[in-house]
Image (cartoon, helix red, strand yellow):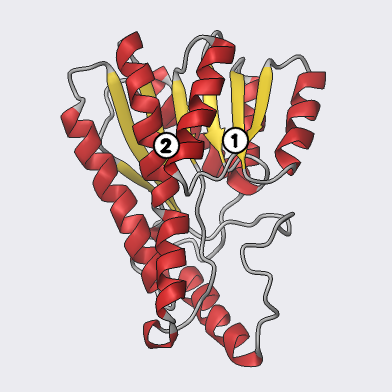
Amino acid sequence: MRFNDKVVAITGAAQGIGRQTAIQAAQEGARLLLIDRSRHVHELAATLASGGCQVLALEADLEQWESTEQVFAAGVAHFGQLDVLVNNVGGTIWARPFAEYQPDQIEKEIRRSLFPTLWGCRAALPWMLKQGHGSIVNISSVATGGVNRVPYSAAKGGVNALTRSIAMEYSGSGIRINAVAPGGTDAPARLVPRNEETPSAQEQAWYQQVIDQTLDSSLMHRYGTLTEQANAILFLASDDASYITGVTLPVAGGDLG
């Protein structure tokens, strides 16, 4: 029960790694603030509440500062505290060689995979500073070294940099901030796809190159599981990692990114 009496906020909680992290945090006693732009976050909240978890689900567009600020304020008003934040929003929208990206696609990739983490940290820090303690885990990616995802790689490189910089700035405040860098991860089909366009044969071939490179780069030559990712996230979030801050931990079967 590492999170007994703690309030854990998880963004991008409706599916994938965020959903699995929420399920496991609930099993360890957390009170949960679940944030997602999708209404499916309420379905997860209802399931967890039926098992006895104290949970609040809120919808927000975390690519925008105003909605991010508002949703964190609402969560703290409800629970009275914020002990842990898992910044999980992000993900590749397109997969293609960099010269094939359109300028608006590059901007959308950066906005999707960098700004929600940047805004989440900015929104959570004032509350944690008032408390004198807190733990933030940002979800990065080992795709900072990968093919056909340069804008996404740049965004996740930014997540690594802000993780280290914030850790340095607030090292004496009782706040730890770390990142987990997942590799390829097996997950069910997304409830809300990141890209609703039907991929062409060429786009499918480019995405297959991503899969091949991911498997080749992993020393274990396999994808990870959602549980394996959530285990690492919750370790860094917990007091078990009390002497760890400013670190980006690859969870990718030996691929260091």
Q: Give the vertical position of 165 relative to 85 (above or below).
A: below
- Residue at image position (36%, 35%) is 121
Identify the secondary structure beneath mark 1.
strand
Q: Is residue 114 visible?
A: yes
Q: Upstream in the sequence, badge 2 or badge 1?
A: 1
Q: Give the vertical position of 181 relative to 171 (above or below).
A: below
- Residue at image position (43%, 27%) is 237
- Residue at image position (39%, 53%) is 114
- Residue at image position (63%, 57%) is 186
Q: Which mark is residue 211?
A: none
Disc 2 from disc 1: Cα separation: 11 Å
> In the rendered view, does 177 fall on the left or right side of 11?
left
Q: Quadrant of residue 169?
A: top left
Residue density around tag 2, few if under 14, some if 14–19, many if 20 or more, within 10 Å: many
Q: Give the vertical position of 139 relative to 242 (above or below).
A: below
Q: Where is residue 24 in the image (x, y as percent from the top left)?
A: 63, 29
So how many labels did they put on this image? 2
Q: Give the vertical position of 10 relative to 193 (above or below).
A: above
The residue furthest bottom is: 202
In depth, the one of 40 and 144 nearer the eye is 40
Q: Quadrant of the C terminus?
A: bottom left
Q: Residue 120 carries which label?
A: 2
Q: In which quarter of the image is residue 47?
A: top right
Q: Quadrant of the N terminus?
A: top right
Q: Can residue 2 be seen in this view?
A: no
Q: Name the residue under label 1.
A: 35
Tag 2: residue type? Gly
In depth, the one of 17 and 59 nearer the eye is 59
Q: Position of residue 72 (x, y in %)?
A: 49, 27
> In the rendered view, does 226 fall on the left or right side of 167?
right
Residue density around tag 1, few if under 14, some if 14–19, many if 20 or more, within 10 Å: many
